[in-house]
Image (tube, helix red, strand yellow):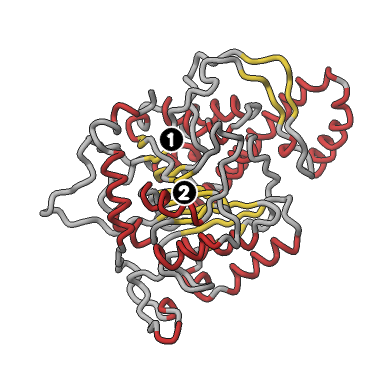
Amino acid sequence: MKRLKSFFLRTHQALENPRWILPLAIFSTLSLLLLFLTTLTSLASPFSLLPPSLSPAVFVKPNLQPLPPPPRLAYVVSGSAGDGPMLKRTLLALYHPSNRYVVHLDAESPPQERLDVESFVKNNTLFGKFSNVVMIKKPNLVTYRGPTMVANTLHAAAILLRAGGEWDWFINLSAKDYPLVTQDDLLHTFSNLPRDLNFIDHTSDLGRNEAKPVIVDPGLYMAKKADILRITQGRSVPTAFKLFAGSAWMALSRPFIDFCIGGWDNLPRTVLMYYANFISSPEGYFHTVICNAEEFRNTTVNSDLHFISWDNPPKQHPRYLTVDDMAKMVDSNAPFARKFHVDDPVLDKIDSELLFRGKDMVVPGGWCIGSRENGTDPCSVVGNVTVIRPTAGAKRLENLISSLLSSEKFRPWQCK
């Protein structure tokens, strides 16, 4: 691998000569495929698929049937340089002993910032007690509009599969995201859902029927972040599969993650090769795979479960949220929102009014049985981790899910 890295560094000097651009695009594609295949070989074996069992009225289950155990969630929370403090805060706000977490600060983050987050994870008493938080110590170089972000997401998913343990949904977040409901609210509401539903916004038609330029993501071969390289020649729209696009944030089922990582079907690899030299790959890769896979296209719920505020006309990135957005966030019924500055007062307001989280503490749930007297952390004493105590956030989230699964929105919005 060191010889390959040295080779790619030397070839970067030749980029001033246009004849090197197309071969480099091919090398970039092969690099991403090699990374993906390396990930596959780290897994012991593929996991079996769960059969889909969906109908438009799946949210409410008959009272005579006992509810299954509360679902367990697997999160990847990623950040870049300067995101360390916000990443730590977001992790505390998301924590529950039954869940699993992968934390990643990319290679642009200074070593001291990564060491600080690593120490935070290592020294947290709860994280150590349940051994459910892992930090990727060898960081990836991530270009957030390029295929390296997809590769990073697949890497985190593979870590969660390889580590074993039960979990039901895989949720990708950035350090600038923050929850608007407690984990007990999510576990409570998702208990009523089939475990093969996939929450993914995939209705965007941006460039779906247009030729796309070929790009090279330097994160695949450079040691430091550089601008994406564009080749003027476009590529034709594929005929073997249909392109879909939408939000880069999603909650994907364990069966679908198994399908993407397990390697027993050619579609995920074929689409990955296409998106290896594609702009905004995070907004199209999983969307295109799921909507072209017969066994999963009817499992999609067209939502990224986020409240996001855009300028008008929209810019490349959404607005940072403030206290002025608080009412809109609550009224959206969404379980997550983005983007936030680390010290913005709106985060304190969310903590006190929606999450009931004390400073530097995790969000309390039914598993926390300690005293709250004099500001004591109730989660310092751990009870039964399967006990959940939903708040008003569960009702808001239930309203959102019921709307998304209604006959007007569920089937008509699937992979169209």
| Observer-nearest of 237 and 374 | 374
Q: Label 2 vs label 1: CA separation?
A: 13 Å
Residue hosting label 1: 201
Crowding at dot 1, Cα within 10 Å, few <14 / some 14-19 / many 20+, comes out as many
Taking 243 as reference, is 197 above or below it? below
| Observer-nearest of 44 and 339 | 339
Taking 335 as reference, is 149 above or below it? above
Amino acid type at circle 2 is: Ile
Q: Which corner quadrant of the image does residue 196 belong to?
A: top left
Locate residue 58 relative to residue 203 in the image: left or right: left
| Observer-nearest of 408 and 243 | 408
| Observer-nearest of 159 and 176 | 176
Q: Which corner quadrant of the image does residue 305 belong to?
A: top left
Q: Which residue is farthest left?
A: 64
Q: Nearer the viewer, mark 2 or mark 1?
A: 1
Point 71% across, 62% down: residue? 113
Q: Quadrant of the C terminus?
A: top left
Q: Which corner quadrant of the image does residue 233 belong to?
A: top right
Crowding at dot 2, Cα within 10 Å, few <14 / some 14-19 / many 20+, comes out as many
Q: Which residue is farthest bottom?
A: 374
Residue hosting label 2: 171
Amino acid type at circle 1 is: Asp
Locate residue 40 relative to residue 58 in the image: left or right: right
Point 43% across, 58% down: residue? 165
